[in-house]
Amino acid sequence: MSEEDQKPRISKTKDGSTTLYSPVFDQHYHNPNGAVAESKIVFFETPGLVDALQQRNHIAIFEMGFGTGLNFILLKNYLDDLENPPTVDFYSVEAFPVDPETAVKFNFGEELNQQNPGELLKSIFSDAEPGTNSIQISKYLTLNLFIGPFDDSPNPDQPIGYFFHDPFSPDVNAELWTPQVFQRLRSYAEKSALLATYCAASSARAAMAVAGWKISRAPGALGKREMTLASLNEKNLDGFKRVNELRLVQRYERGDFD
């Protein structure tokens, strides 16, 4: 496959918003049934982040996979809608940054109150260099974007309250769904932290369980039956159907997911 053929291509999803298709991973970056709709459900509504943005003075978020920047743009949109937004430090890791000229073409839906979010993303991707890039987006939003592999990324300089685990699926990007990865994320977490992911694979949940996370099922978005919500404190998962972490650990140790 030539370098040109490996480049991600813009694809329109069913809610009108755009995503990318990766020929290398043979996957879309988001749900083809609706990129914006899925991200809102998985990362903002299900873990209760929408309410937390209205109630807390400060929140730190860690995202695995900056991708198209959609989750970050949605976060900015939620904050811009608030009369008294909290300060938010957003940490994200991206090994394969999007080309700025591609980013400027993204359309994340007419409901966004931002003018030309693609221009902001173009600026971010144009200025970002390998390593950590700290960008003050507004008086209440800071982006700390690491360009490079997760293994090389520095630890956040503060406890994380919300995790967006949003890399490609375990089938094609298994290295970001291991117990070692989830153990490292656990080391970042504040006591009440929540980790949300679109993924419902038993192998991913087993890796979380081995790393000491408590895990629950949650209704999936846009045709997906389930997603996963995890925390270090099982009380944070009240209202969701829990999984049997011990059984998952036993299956992992038995090699069921090898």
Image: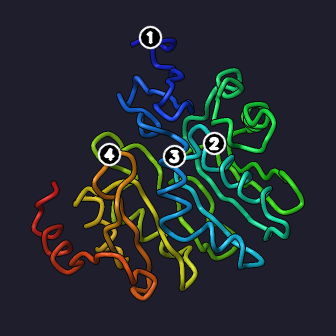
Which kind of residue does numbered mark 4 sit on? Gly
Q: Residue 69: which numbered mark, if any? A: 2
Q: Residue 223: which numbered mark, if any? A: 4
Counting residues from the N terminus, which is met first, the one under dot 1 or under dot 4?
Answer: 1
Which kind of residue does numbered mark 1 sit on? Ser
**CB of mark 1 within 8 Å of CB of mark 2?**
no
**Is 121 left or right of 233, judged from the image as shown?**
right
Q: State the CA–CA distance, disc 1 to disc 2.
A: 25 Å
Q: Position of residue 69 (x, y in %)?
A: 63, 42
Which kind of residue does numbered mark 2 sit on? Gly
Say which of marks 1 and 3 sits in front.
3
Give the camera-side residue of 68 and 125. Answer: 68
Element at label 4:
loop
Q: State the CA–CA distance, disc 4 to disc 2.
A: 23 Å
Counting residues from the N terminus, which is met first, the one under dot 1 or under dot 3?
Answer: 1
Give the camera-side residue of 47 and 201. Answer: 47
**For residue 224, above or below residue 180:** above
Which kind of residue does numbered mark 3 sit on? Ala
Q: Mark 1 points at which residue?
A: 2
Q: State the CA–CA distance, disc 4 to disc 3.
A: 12 Å
